[in-house]
Amino acid sequence: MLVLQSHRSENLPEWIQRCMESVREWAELVGAEYYCAGDREVLSLLPVEFVRKLERRWPMLVDLGRLLLVKRALEAGEKRVVWLDADVLVFDPKAMRLPVGIKNGYAFGREDWIEKSCKVRRGVHNALCVFEQGNPFLDYYIHACERIVEQHEGQHLAPQLLGPKFLKMQYNLLHFELCESVAMLSPVVVQDMLEGEGRLWEKQKVQAEFGAVNLCGSLVDDASGLAAVRCLLGQ
């Protein structure tokens, strides 16, 4: 098994460094190889027109970039490739478990997005992606990302269009396998956890058993990210 990540190599916030260290340590614990691709490497895999049209919208560029990194690894002979976003913290390695066998050879993260009202919105996230040799979805997903960007402009290229929004639509039709081991923490859950109130954080924990969290780096500042990492690690 190969565990993949990507992030710039310079000026990393401390909390992102610690998140990535936790993933490397988890990979070593489970006997997996680990590889982190830099920005230039990801960009080199992307179609020129795709990059031009999305300009600096890095999250959308990486939505396709991760798939191309996975495809390259599978073509090189890897049997199973796991992608984890750079803002994923493995805080309980024993609870960070992936299915031994995955029906049809692909899976994504289950998202339980908790709002301030305690309402839970269920969806799919790609902070965790698992692909195995011979899966039928990866090539289709790559094609879909390229086609969506080709066909849409401006506001129609909304954030998360190539990730959670696309995957939720696919899940509603296909009901592919979802993994619960990486929870998606909304900013209000992070704030609740840091303030020690616990209502929203406890709500999150009863949704599923997870050993890692995605801290949504695009929605939290570095100070909150670092405080959340320290809190989850009991420091």
Image (cartoon, rainbow, N blue to C red):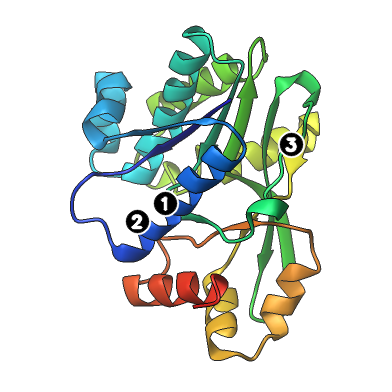
Which label's residue is closer to the chain start, 3 or 1? 1
Q: Which quadrant would residue 200 be assigned to in this image? A: bottom right
Residue at 35% x, 72% y is 221
- Measuring from the top left, give residue 87's x and y in whole percent: 44, 55
Residue for badge 2? 17
- Measuring from the top left, give residue 124's x and y in whole percent: 66, 46
Tags 3 and 1 in contact by the CB under 8 Å rule? no
Residue at 24% x, 20% y is 48
If the image is split into quadrants, where does the N terminus sit? top right
At label 2, which amino acid type do we have?
Answer: Gln
Q: Is residue 119 visible?
A: no
Image label count: 3
Q: Between tags 3 and 1, which lies in front?
A: 1
Q: Which quadrant would residue 35 be assigned to in this image? A: top left
Tags 2 and 1 in contact by the CB under 8 Å rule? yes
Residue for badge 1? 21
Residue at 59% x, 35% y is 129
Residue for badge 3? 171
Relative placement, left or right, of 43 versus 3 is: left
At label 3, which amino acid type do we have?
Answer: Tyr
Residue nearest the viewer, comparing 142 with 151: 142
At label 1, which amino acid type do we have?
Answer: Glu
Counting other residues with Cα less than 10 Å from the Cα at mark 1, is it few (<14), some (14-19), or many (20 or more)? some
Which label's residue is closer to the chain start, 2 or 3? 2
